[in-house]
Image (tube, grey):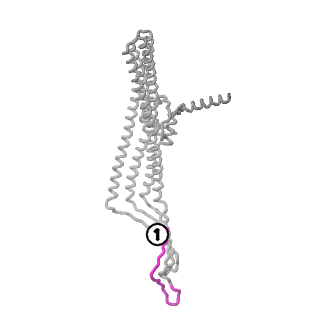
Amino acid sequence: MIALLTVVSLTLGAAEAAEPATPPVLTLNEALQEAREKNLDLKVARARLDQALLQSRRAWAGYLPTVTVGGSYTRNSAEAVLTLPGGGEPVTIQPYDQLGAQAEVRQAILAPTLWPAIRNAGIAEEVSTLNTEYTRREILFGVAQAYFSAASLQEAIRATQFLLEVNQAREKDTQTRFDAGTVTRVALLRAQLDRARAEQDLVRARNSYDSARLALATLLQRESPNFTLQLPEVPEVPAVDQELARKAQEARPDVLAARRNLDLAVGRRTGAWFAYLPNVGFSGVYRLTNAAGFTGQAGTWTLTLNGSWTLWDGGLREVALREESARVAEASALQTAAETKVTQEVATARLDYENARSNLSKAEEALALARETQRLTEISFKAGVATYLEVADANSALTNAEVGAISERLQTSLAALRLQRAAGLFAAED
């Protein structure tokens, strides 16, 4: 008895092992979280931001003290020793082996060009941060679009599978009737043709789904698309608001970056003006050598206060000033263009969403009518009132309505995402 139970257990275990494991379900939130952690484009953007955030330290380095040290060894061909009259100790002017060391400190006291440069570095860091945030939102927006598309194709497979099952059952029933002599061979051939078309449609739908799932897996840096999806609800959209475009201009990082870019251009133009001012610096040097010379001291030091004022540099400052003024005009135009673009995108996205929602409503109504038509046609066919062609047309219309409703739901979801993005509400925060 124990041996029999063991054999049965092994058989059941082998059967379970032979069954393919059901792929795990990947939700939209999980996909977005994976993209935040693994997407390569996002990692590149973050690495570039880390580089950009060093600009302030680089700018401040010009105002911090610079300390340098150095040493030297020199072998001279001859030694120079001075013997003073009166019997004093000889003074070595040049020894055979001459050693020297030096330490120097430099500090900028008045460096006008550094003042706007430090401020501009902070603005540039803000611009880089805003651009990185814009890139992050665009990447996650692309992931959300890919997810909705793949999930909709997954739903389309189910509708196509249903049509195949209906046609397979219809073919089997027609074969039975043909064998009984109640239908013609033409009816059987039509049933077989419909089944073959349904099989091809299913293959096409599965291939499209696999392609979309592979694209999503690539965005998530997955080696294989071994997952299924869960079609989310249509995203919520902001209510109709006359101030939505203005609010979007205050929320979208690309517009904020354009505004700060204008501030940066103005700051750089100011830096060009500051190049006309003089510079003042301080330096201190300490030297140590074994050739004391006439002072008799091995160590000496000097303190220097130096100033410079460039009165004419060949016109380079004037060229720089004109160039920066042109960049201010460019940045101002780009800011206006960015704000205008937001207004246009919000209006267009709202119209697209309203149109998609209307189409979805009609598609759902058509689906309900197609289901009722298919049900009544099936009853009529079994009662001998409807023909096979009417049944086939009803089944095809139902499948088309199913796929159409799925497609319109996808378009509505994508339109809602685009409206969120245009309004600056698609932040996809961690």
**Residue most toward the right?**
1
The answer to whether residue 238 shows anywhere in this view is no
Name the residue at 31% across, 61% down: 314
In front here: 194 or 282?
194
**Does any portion of residue 304 appear in the rendered image?**
yes
Q: Residue furthest bottom?
A: 86
- Residue at 51% over, 90% down: 86
Question: Residue 149 location in percent, x, y?
Answer: 44, 32
Few, some or many C-alpha atoms within 10 Å of disc 1 (few <14, some 14-19, many ≥20)?
A: few
Q: Name the amino acid, label 1.
A: Thr
Q: Which residue is mark 1?
A: 304
Q: Which residues are magenta?
A: 69-90
Callout 1 secondary element: strand
Residue shown at the point (51%, 86%) measured from the top left = 90
* Foreground pick, 98 / 410: 410
Location of residue 275 (image quadrant): bottom left
Indicate left or right for 2 with 198 as reference: right
- Residue 255, position as x, y percentages in the image: 41, 41
**Percent from the top left, x then y, of residue 309?**
38, 64
Q: Nearer the viewer, residue 422 or 378?
A: 378
Q: Magenta span has 72? A: yes
Q: How many marks?
A: 1
Nearer the observer, 251 or 70: 70
Quadrant, the N terminus: top right
Percent position (x, y) of residue 21?
54, 32
**The image quarter in which residue 244 lies:** top left
Residue 42 vertical position relative to residue 317 in the rendered view, above or below: above
